[in-house]
Image (cartoon, rainbow, N blue to C red):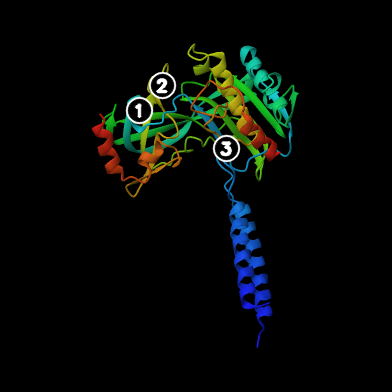
Amino acid sequence: MISNKRIALLGLAILVMTTSASAWYGWANRDKGPRTQMAWVYKGTDARELFDYADIVALGTVTAAYPGRVVYVNGGEDKLPYQLVEFSIESAVKGVRDGEIVMIERAGGMDPDGQYHVIDADGGEYWAGARYLLFLKWQENRSGYTYLINDAARYESERGRLTAVDDEDPVSARFEDMRANKALDLLRSWN
Amino acid sequence: MNKRRASTLWVAIAVVGVYLGSAGATWANNRWGCWKYQNASINVYNGASQAWYRHYQKKIWSHSRAWDPYTDLVLTQVSSPGKTDHINCYADFYGNNGWLGIAEILTYSGCIIKEGRTRCNKTYLNNGGYSKKNKRHVACQEVGHLFGLDHQYANTCMNDSILTKPRPNAHDRNMVNGIY
């Protein structure tokens, strides 16, 4: 018969092993966090204010994304590439009509030296074929191009539900995990 | 050892195990992921010009609450940009794309940043609508990110919902000193 002492020692050994494995797993898989941080021009704390600030609010599908301009600084010491994203409007709420295509310009992508710039504070690259609810603003001095207002202005719609870039953001929390149709109804009521 | 003592021991070990298991994934607030430089000695290249050169100088070295004198960091100013243990700082007209500043980690190994880059967007910040204090708030914040800090909501340049506190606070200092 096994004594209580042996049972305790066996349990101790198992727990030490599982504890070590758990600690190692937690450490190895800790979230590194995004690769960029951004200070936004507009950083509101209320979803209605974000809606009022936006020129365009719509649910649509990204149909294509490709390289755009590159900003060269100090003769090329710093290069910031931009990407152009075609956003096909399916459910317009504000500033556009269904069927229109809106061009979004965002920082990120490959620069001419082959250096990839992971700009992910805005949610990162858009996936062609994916659906998004976006709050956009027209660019001043660059007609025809829009930009994403901030990280609370982008929601991916998967199986009819919205996912925010940062679900802890107070504005994003308003739409996080909301059904897209319900969000559209709410937004249209603000129009 | 009786059964009662053995059970107590098991419970104590389980509690410690759960704590240690979650510790690797849990970081204090205001910590940006697990990012940091190898150590407190970091090379900093100020690639901005004119007034923006001075904004970076002020926020990194010359003000009493600038990152170098206020924290344990040893920030060595270098004359050219680099890709190892470097922060390269810039300010230019990047366009009307909704952002005032970006802190970008270009190259890294694990959680160790090799090359970080800060950019202040003069398209907005030099359009007449932003004060010197606002500009220095952004410069202070972008550099602060690369030391491993996230945004926080207090009277500090790491607060991204205001632009009027162009210096780190004691919490930022303690976080940075704790990281390095």
Locate the N terminus of chain B and report the quarter of the image it occupies.
Answer: bottom right
Q: Amino acid at mark 2?
A: Gln
Which of label 2 and label 1 is nearer to you? 1
Marking on residue A139: 2
Q: Which residue is mark 3?
A: B30
In the rendered structure, the answer to whether residue B150 lies left or right of residue B1 reads left
Of marks 2 and 1, which one's residue comes earlier in the chain?
1
Marking on residue A49: 1
Q: Chain of mark 3?
A: B
Q: Mark 1 and mark 3, same subunit?
A: no
Q: Chain of mark 2?
A: A
Considering the numbered disc 1 on the image, is that residue within a helix, a strand or a loop?
A: helix
Instruction: Tell me which corner region of the image, top left, top right, bottom left or bottom right, holds residue A168.
Output: top left
Look at 55% across and 23% down and name the residue there.
Answer: A71
Q: Chain of mark 1?
A: A
Q: Is residue B57 visible?
A: yes
Considering the numbered disc 2 on the image, is that residue within a helix, a strand or a loop?
A: loop
The percent position of residue A6, horizontal first and vertical second, equals 68, 79
Q: Amino acid at mark 3?
A: Asn
Which of label 2 and label 3 is nearer to you? 3
Q: B44 or B73, which lies in front?
A: B73
Considering the numbered disc 3 on the image, is that residue within a helix, a strand or a loop?
A: loop
CA separation in Å, label 2 and label 3: 32 Å
Disc 2 packing (10 Å; few <14; some 14–19; many ≥20): some
Indicate whether A14 appears above or below A59.
below
